[in-house]
Amino acid sequence: MDNRSEIRDFLATRRARLTPERVGLPAGGGRRRVPGLRREEVAVLAGVSTEWYTRLEKGHIGGVSEDVLEAVARALQLDEAERLYLFDLARAARPTNRAPRRRKQAEVPPRIQWMLDAMTASASFVRNGRMDIVATNALGRALYSPMFAGDDRRPANIARYQFLDASARNYFADWDSAAGITVALLRADAGRDPHNEDLRDLVGELSTLSEEFRTRWAGHDVRIHHAGRKQFNHPVVGPLDLVYQSLNLVADLDGGLDLTIYTAEPGTASEDRLKLLASWAATHMPARPSIPRAEGRVAG
């Protein structure tokens, strides 16, 4: 796969955010034409020649050893998500006979749906790498009810809702942060699964229709989705300040699906509102919501 442009832009944007002072190098004289470190400075930090690093930043990464990639990651002060993304780009650059393909439709095993349905006090859902919601419990569907109000011929998609639905700007109390996280998650998944045409189609759609998405995508930020806090302005119960935890559904699911659980801190107004939302969901949401089938890894 020819992913040289992704490699070039990723390394260049990581280099641009560093300064000589930050990495312990002398600032040197003269004005810099572009922000950040020079290529020769990164080469010194990584212990390689300037010519070699220049070739690497032009996208020639397929045959590079893991030790050298680790040295470059340290030189650029990459965090764990960025380091994994660099290694994913290197793997994708190696010669392969794999062609871009459509994923088979995701089938969430009944035991996963049973688990979701048992979480009556938490809003829970399962998503695939391109941010399609492939399964949810009633409270999860109620929490994201504005997103599920769209076209029901295809699965609800967090990224499509955030960037193409005007109501998302009010629904997410900190839309800027939420949008940044979503793009970073999509970028990381694109590195892990570069042959996924469905993900490419989504990125193409959003890049065409949303300047905000296009600008953020060009930033090459990546993220690992584990835990955090998110605020919502829910149209039924009002402000919600929730904590979330995301877990990979591995084992026989072959990866590719994440379980996300939203809860409220005990004794807070958000806990009361989440309980109120659960009561509303009991009368307004189907017990077992029907979700259109989506692209994703097929469960065993």
Image: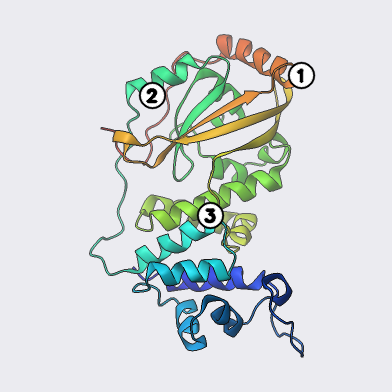
Q: Earlier in the sequence, mark 2 or mark 1?
A: 2
- Which residue is found at the position 49% from the left and 21% from the top? 137
- Which residue is found at the position 46% from the left and 39% from the top? 132
**Depicted 119 relative to depicted 231: above or below:** above
Please name the amino acid that badge 2 sits on: Ile
Q: Earlier in the sequence, mark 3 or mark 1?
A: 3
Res 6 seen here: no
- The residues tagged by marks 3 and 2 sit, at their Cα atoms, a distance apart of 29 Å
Give the residue number, with chain letter if any, for mark 3: 80
**Residue 247: image location, x then y, percent:** 47, 35
Q: Earlier in the sequence, mark 3 or mark 2?
A: 3
Chosen colour scheme: rainbow
Give the residue number, with chain letter if any, for mark 2: 112
Q: Quadrant of the C terminus?
A: top left
**Residue 202: image location, x then y, percent:** 47, 51
Give the residue number, with chain letter if any, for mark 1: 269
Please name the amino acid that badge 3 sits on: Glu
Secondary structure of the residue carrying numbered label 2: helix
Secondary structure of the residue carrying numbered label 1: helix
Q: In this rendered view, identify the residue nearer to me: 234 or 98.
A: 98
- Left or right of 122? Residue 5 is left
Please name the amino acid that badge 1 sits on: Ala
Estimate how packed mark 1 is, as few (under 14), some (14 to 19) or many (20 or more) residues with alpha carbons within 10 Å: some
Res 206 seen here: yes
Secondary structure of the residue carrying numbered label 3: helix
- Which residue is found at the position 60% from the left and 68% from the top? 14
